[in-house]
Image (cartoon, helix red, strand yellow):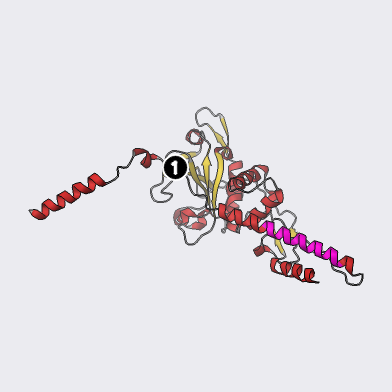
Amino acid sequence: MCTYFVCLMGLLTALILAEPVRAGEIEKPSAPAQSLCPFVRSAADQTQREAEASARLREAERISTQQSDVQHINPVEAPSPAGSPALRADRIFFESFLVNWPFFEDLAPEQQAILQAFFSRCGIASDRLTLAASIFGQLNASQRATFVGITHALMYTSLTDQQSGERLGDALSLIQELIDIQGENSALSSDHQFQMIVRLNPDAPQKLERAALFLRGENHIFHKDYPISFRQFRRIGLHGQEAGLHFCLTRDGRFAQMHIDYRFGLLHLGPANSDVRAEGNHQRHADRWPQFALAERPIRVRRVVLRRQSLDLSVNSLVRE
């Protein structure tokens, strides 16, 4: 009896001392973290250092050329603004495939605007095209492919009111701002790879509710923080209808995870389901959104003579001379 009384008193004391939880703390969702911003700032800083090193190298070459009529130093091509240290080598890219897409200047104006606005919110002056191109080029291949694939699908997905037939604009107009790009990451589950996290415009949930060919549902297992689901209609084996956008919204409709579903059945559960680079997915993408041409464009070659380390060493050597 004494033990029971002591336990009861302890429970009452804990309830009295416990801080009450306000309703606002439960209902108020937190904004998704901008996990990509530290990388963006680091990439911008790296670009600035490389530009300064390149300028020093060119100046040192100019001085050395003036001082010697015999020794001739060939001008060194400056690093590509869309490159990064890891990408400094002669490579060939086929732009017609949504695999790596390294060239910022080849993106549509709407896609460039989304990235530049995101860079600005990370504290980077994005009005300089070369800087924006460099940062985009330093994203890994899966992030670039994810961004290009999803935004391309959004640009060419028209929303129509299922009742009145009224045009509601394209799906890209639902996006207010980019928050994160989640590429390939084997340490995370499949529902945290190959997708974009965005802040939606205030009227986006209503437009999705009204839009024809978007089916509302609930996410019960995957995308737990984004329980409201809007899937674009798709059907296995139906040409041009196998790929489809998937919006996963927070309860308040302010934020969304977005990806593209390319596969069905058990294959739908793996990361490759939303990876446009995976076998067959690019073809399904082009079948659904034929505005993206499969015909190969002219090959673009980015040639860079020196890597960053050799660049820095050359600068130091020429300065000492």
The rendered magenta stretch, by its main secondary structure, is classed as helix
Q: Nearer the viewer, residue 284 or 223?
A: 223
Find out whether residue 50 is within the magenta segment: yes
Furthest residue in direction top, as rendered: 164
Residue occupying image coordinates x 46% and y 38%: 253
Q: Is residue 72 left or right of residue 90?
A: right
Q: Farthest residue to the front: give it.
A: 320
Rendered location of residue 268, percent (x, y): 47, 54
The residue at the point 68 percent across, 57 percent down is 47
**Vertically, is 188 above or below 24?**
below
Q: Is residue 152 visible?
A: no
Total numbered badges shown on the rendered structure: 1
Residue 250, image x, y percentages: 44, 42
Q: Residue at x 63, y 56 (%)?
A: 43
Please identify the residue farthest to the left as the structure is shown: 1
Instruction: Report the residue at 48% width, 52% height from top.
Output: 264
Instruction: Give percent across and percent down for residue 48.
Output: 69, 56
**Which quadrant holds residue 93?**
bottom right
x, y percent for residue 157: 58, 40
- Which range is magenta? 47-64
Residue 71 on the magenta segment:
no
Q: Which amino acid does label 1 sit on?
A: Thr
What residue does disc 1 label?
250
